Structures are given as structure tokens and as C-alpha cells.
């Protein structure tokens, strides 16, 4: 299993702040987002790698665990160890527990491209330090783990912003049997979608939980069920009033700009935000922050008019 240098993936130093990590992730996610690179497999893989790195480094607990793992690995390499012979399982004895981790042979194979997390991520951040075999339901090593098979499995998946808005589906292929799973509209990062009895086991079937990661969208910032966006208008519309076309997840709408609108003023478009999970026909709001573009060049007549206005002020 290969070591993953998540700091290198995001192009930040190990001392990077949370804000620096967030900014680096947003920049790369925008560059490699599948919507901007249709059919580009290399960009798709890069996007998955970026999301995986952000999943670890944006979480203080996961980042602290990763730094411990990195330090152990770096010390071992400095002592002359070769990458291919490092026993990653030994790190489970060093305090990396906390919950159950399950390994279902090739769990990602059930999901096609919807998962995409590396073996390194699944070993250390898929839930903790316990490893089980799907076929036997028994621990792989007597020194590592409990005697009972896990009751549930988790698989992280990344969906797009618009899939979260409209809802989507994923098809599981379990032992040749296909099962379509519905992901409801309104899910957010961290939402768990339960698939009852999806994983074959000795007790008749264990539940699978799809842990949702919603990719960021460059046009909208999500805060709960509300969305935030920006719109630039010209000076004359701000002063005299006018109209502005606003993009929403459900289509474009016209926003009436009242006379005297100030730069940075926020308008609320009720019901134009994200669907509220499990509450049919209920939506959050879209908050539109207005920026005012000042003219860089004025004609002679325009300058005279502005000068006249200034004298009358």
C-alpha cells in the first residue's frame, strides 16, 4: 500500500493553517471539477485525490492522526526502510483506534467510480483500527481485533452540488446482483444514507451506510440549507434602480434592484436555496450579495454631470 502525502496533493506546507488548506482545496477543486473537465479521466482521478486529501486535512482530529502516521513513516524511511516493506498494520497498535473499520475485500468495486478512496485512506480513516473479512466475518489477526463481525459498513462517496440539490442514485453491484440506491435531495457533507442488509454476512446481511461528501460549487456557498452567491451590478442600476439576472440552482430569476442600493447589500430570495432534507417542497433561502462596479473611464459629459452632482451635495 502506498503512502499518501496529502500536503503535497493540496500543494501546502505541513504548517499550513486551516484557512490555507481550505483555499488550496477550493482552487484545485474548481480546476479539476468533473463539470469543467467532461470525459477527462485524469482530471477525475485528480479530483478524487484532492477530495481525499481535504477530507483528512480539513478535519483537526484526522489531521492530527495523519501527522502521527506521517512522522512514524518518515522516521522508518530515514532509518533506511524501503517503501514497499513497511507494515502499516503495526500502526494500529499505536493508538489509532476509535470505532470500527471494516474491509470488505474490494468495497470500492461495488460502487464503480462513486467511492474512489485509496487503501491508505480506508485503512486509517475509514472508521478506526478494526479489520474484518467479508467472507468469514472473523478477525484477520488474533492480536488486533474483536471476535464479533461488524453490524454495519460505511463507504464515503462524493456527489456534485447539483446531485445534492436534485437528488441522485448510485448502483451497487454486490456479488453480481445490482441494487439501485436513492440519495435524496438536500443531503449535505456528513449525511449518511442507509442501505439495509446490503453487505452479505453470516447473520443474513449487514447494513451499509453511504457517507456523503458534497463537492463545492464555485457559484454557491452553502450554509446549512441556505445558499450564498454574489452579483455585480453597474453604478447606474445601484443609484437609480433596475433589474439583475440571478442564477439559482433551479434556474435564472430576475431580482429587482431598488434605487440607492449599497455595495455589499444582501438580498434574500426566499425558497431559492437547498431542499430541506426529508421535508418535501421546503427549501432554504438564496442570499445575494450585491457588488457595484464603478466605471473606470468617464466621458467628458459624464464627468461634468458627476461634478455637478458633487457641487449640489
Image: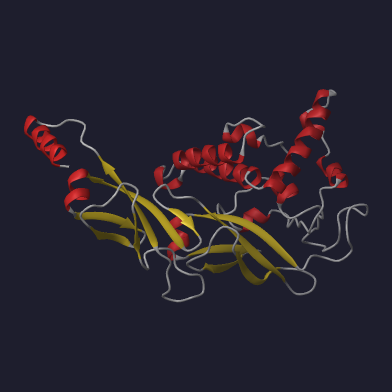
51 or 268: nearer the eye? 268
In x, y percent, where is residue 9? 59, 35
In x, y percent, where is residue 85? 82, 33
65 or 232: nearer the eye? 232
Q: Quadrant of residue 98?
A: bottom right
In x, y percent, where is residue 304? 8, 33
Task: Please state, as top left, top right, bottom left or bottom right, where the C terminus lies in the image.
Answer: top left
The reply, left or right, for residue 169 in relation to residue 300 is right
Task: Please state, as top left, top right, bottom left or bottom right, where the N terminus lies in the image.
Answer: top right
The residue at 37%/68% (across/down) is 271
The answer to whether 174 is drawn above or below residue 43 in the figure is below
The residue at the far bottom in this view is 280
The answer to whether 275 is drawn above or below residue 89 in the figure is below
The reply, left or right, for residue 71 in relation to residue 306 is right
The reply, left or right, for residue 81 in relation to residue 41 is right
The residue at 65%/65% (across/down) is 209
7 or 77: nearer the eye? 7
In x, y percent, where is residue 183? 52, 66
169 or 63: nearer the eye? 63
The reply, left or right, for residue 95 in relation to residue 103 is right
The answer to whether 252 is drawn above or below residue 275 in the figure is above
The residue at the far right in this view is 143
Q: Total number of numbered labels?
A: 0
The residue at the far front in this view is 312
The residue at 38%/58% (across/down) is 287
Amino acid at each position: 500500500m502506498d503512502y499518501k502525502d496529502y500536503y503535497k496533493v493540496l500543494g501546502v506546507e505541513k504548517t499550513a493553517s486551516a484557512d490555507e488548506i481550505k483555499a488550496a482545496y477550493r482552487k484545485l477543486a474548481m480546476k479539476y471539477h468533473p463539470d469543467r473537465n467532461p470525459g477527462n479521466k485524469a482530471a477525475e482521478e485528480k479530483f478524487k485525490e484532492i477530495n481525499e486529501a481535504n477530507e483528512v486535512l480539513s478535519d483537526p482530529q484526522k489531521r492530527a492522526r495523519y501527522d502521527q502516521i506521517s512522522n512514524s513513516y518518515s522516521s522508518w524511511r530515514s532509518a533506511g526502510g524501503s517503501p514497499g516493506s513497511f507494515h502499516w498494520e503495526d500502526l494500529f497498535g499505536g493508538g489509532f483506534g476509535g470505532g470500527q473499520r471494516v474491509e470488505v475485500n474490494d468495497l470500492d468495486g461495488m460502487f464503480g467510480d462513486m467511492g474512489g478512496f485509496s487503501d491508505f485512506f480506508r485503512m486509517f480513516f475509514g472508521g478506526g483500527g478494526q479489520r474484518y473479512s467479508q467472507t468469514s466475518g472473523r478477525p484477520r489477526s488474533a492480536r488486533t481485533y474483536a471476535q464479533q463481525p461488524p453490524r454495519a459498513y460505511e463507504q464515503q462517496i462524493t456527489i456534485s452540488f447539483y446531485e445534492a440539490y436534485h437528488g441522485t442514485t448510485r448502483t451497487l453491484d454486490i456479488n453480481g446482483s445490482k441494487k439501485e440506491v436513492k440519495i435524496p435531495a438536500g443531503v449535505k457533507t456528513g449525511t449518511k444514507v442507509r442501505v439495509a442488509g446490503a453487505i452479505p454476512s453470516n447473520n443474513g446481511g449487514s447494513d451499509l451506510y453511504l457517507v456523503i461528501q458534497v463537492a463545492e460549487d464555485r457559484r454557491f456557498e452553502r450554509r446549512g440549507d441556505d445558499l450564498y452567491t454574489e452579483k455585480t451590478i453597474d453604478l447606474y442600476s445601484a443609484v437609480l434602480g433596475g433589474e439583475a439576472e440571478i442564477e439559482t440552482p433551479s434556474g435564472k430569476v430576475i431580482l429587482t434592484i431598488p434605487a440607492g442600493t449599497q455595495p455589499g447589500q444582501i438580498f434574500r430570495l426566499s425558497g431559492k436555496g437547498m431542499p430541506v432534507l426529508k421535508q418535501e417542497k421546503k427549501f432554504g433561502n438564496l442570499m445575494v450579495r450585491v457588488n457595484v462596479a464603478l466605471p473606470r473611464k468617464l466621458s467628458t459629459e459624464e464627468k461634468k454631470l458627476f461634478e455637478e452632482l458633487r457641487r449640489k451635495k
